[in-house]
């Protein structure tokens, strides 16, 4: 809960566009966890969803135009589905507001690059999910790497494999349309963590497949509806990082079960098990070269619980203090977006893809 003295702390006004499945945890944390932000209003194409959210989180329903013109709002959080990320973020920036968007930054790399350049031109901040790498789990792993506990990083592996989201998500169709698929849906969590821990990626190769051409929804709202699959659902990538390390990532909606780790990092002096990058906490385990077993490392920072919106709070801190060192930055999100596209481009062309973007490496979050 917020401290009693929160009224003395400067708060940055936030507006939210999109009141879908992910919005609840953002609103809960903006109103109950982070002291330097204030939820001014929300909007959604479905009026009943906006009204329910406004009532629950003690804010008001606004139109998109009202959010973009409000003098109270400095940050607009874009929680629409992927096709809305680019056009709405562009509207946000053109309205003179700072933009924070759910992943991915945009459907296309070119549009994502345009957004980052537009923000810079206007002197605004643009940031994007995920911000889970700012949580205690991955930050502890980053500290271990920074301190040389496993030596120089030489490799990594990452696995996100399940059998799709149609069994639990109320509206799962977009996961199988352009902008969806396992790489664009879950890849940002894993790639953002890898980039934060190891540094930027230089070269990418990839292969992908569509194992099931249709999906049948089994969640209650649309149970029995058949979805045509339009994107690859089993995606494998090889990543050569700028420091020379080589990583493997597999994202799949086609796997019924597996026993593989979320992320492992391999160094010249040992190996590390990194917790699920879709969360903020979890166990960090290290086995150094002289040991015979993995040992759990105590978490070294705060935010081990679900802290979605931490990136929004950090953006507010940057605005309040005149800083530009946004952690969940548009630059980082753009680099991850280019990696994801490169995996698919490599599959289509049969060639390695050299990346044009980069970003900051090991992030040790001190906010």
Image: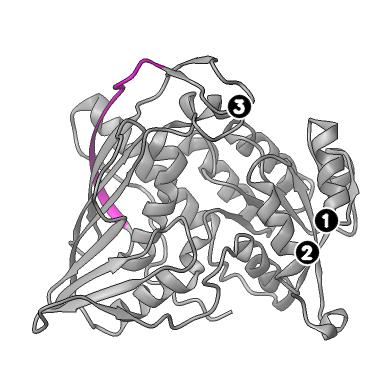
Instruction: Say which of marks 3 and 1 sits in front.
Output: 3
Q: In percent of the image, x 61 and y 35: which residue is there? A: 81
Q: What secondary structure is found at the residue carrying circle 3?
A: loop
Instruction: Say which of marks 3 and 2 sits in front.
Output: 3
Residue 340's spot in the image, x, y percent?
37, 41
- From which residue to which does the magenta span run? 201-214
Residue 217's spot in the image, x, y percent?
51, 22
Residue under numbered circle 2? 31
**In the picture provided, is 129 more to the left or to the right than 318?**
left
- The dot on residue 57 is 1
Dot 1 or dot 2: first in sequence order is 2
Residue under numbered circle 3? 220
Q: Quadrant of residue 122?
A: bottom right
Q: What secondary structure is found at the residue carrying circle 1?
A: loop
Q: In percent of the image, x 87 and y 39: which residue is there? A: 63
Note whether 342 is above or below 31 in the view shown: above
Dot 3 or dot 2: first in sequence order is 2
Question: Which quadrant is home to the N terminus?
Answer: bottom right
Of 160 and 340, nearer the camera is 160
**In the picture provided, is 241 more to the left or to the right than 268?**
right
Task: Characterize the local packing of mark 2: few (<14), some (14-19) or many (20 or more) Cα atoms within 10 angstroms.
Answer: many
Of 345 and 264, nearer the camera is 264
Of 336 and 293, nearer the camera is 293
Badges 1 and 2: C-beta atoms under 8 Å apart?
Answer: yes
């Amino acid at each position: 809960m917020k401290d009693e003295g929160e009224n003395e702390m400067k708060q940055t006004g936030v507006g939210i566009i999109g009141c879908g499945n992910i919005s609840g945890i953002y609103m809960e944390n903006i109103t109950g966890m982070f002291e330097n932000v204030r939820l001014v209003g929300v909007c959604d194409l479905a009026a009943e969803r906006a009204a329910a959210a406004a009532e629950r989180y003690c804010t008001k329903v606004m139109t998109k135009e009202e959010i973009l013109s409000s003098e109270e709002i400095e940050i607009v959080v874009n929680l629409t589905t992927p096709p809305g990320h680019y056009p709405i973020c562009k509207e946000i920036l053109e309205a003179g507001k700072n933009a924070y968007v759910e992943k991915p930054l945009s459907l296309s790399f070119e549009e994502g690059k345009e957004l980052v350049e537009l923000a810079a031109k206007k002197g605004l901040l643009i940031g994007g999910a995920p911000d889970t790498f700012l949580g205690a789990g991955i930050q502890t792993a980053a500290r271990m790497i920074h301190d040389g506990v496993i030596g120089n990083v030489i490799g990594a592996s990452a696995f996100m494999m399940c059998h799709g989201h149609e069994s639990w998500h109320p509206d799962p169709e977009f996961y199988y349309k352009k902008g969806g698929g396992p790489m664009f849906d879950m890849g940002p969590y894993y790639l953002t963590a890898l980039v934060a821990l190891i540094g930027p990626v230089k070269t990418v190769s990839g292969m992908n497949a569509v194992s099931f051409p249709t999906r049948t929804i089994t969640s209650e709202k649309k149970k029995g509806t058949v979805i045509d699959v339009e994107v690859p659902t089993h995606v494998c990538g090889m990543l050569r990082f700028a420091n020379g390390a080589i990583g493997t990532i597999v994202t799949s909606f086609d796997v019924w079960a597996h026993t593989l780790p979320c992320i492992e990092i391999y160094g010249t002096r040992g190996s590390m098990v990194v917790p699920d990058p879709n969360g903020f906490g979890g166990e960090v385990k290290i086995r150094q070269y002289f040991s015979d077993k993995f040992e759990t490392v105590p978490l070294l920072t705060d935010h081990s619980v679900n802290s979605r919106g931490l990136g929004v709070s950090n953006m507010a801190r940057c605005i309040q203090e005149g800083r530009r060192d946004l952690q969940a930055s548009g630059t980082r999100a753009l680099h991850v977006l280019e990696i994801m596209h490169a995996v698919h481009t490599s599959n289509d062309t049969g060639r390695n893809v050299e990346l044009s973007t980069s970003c900051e490496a090991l992030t040790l979050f001190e906010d």
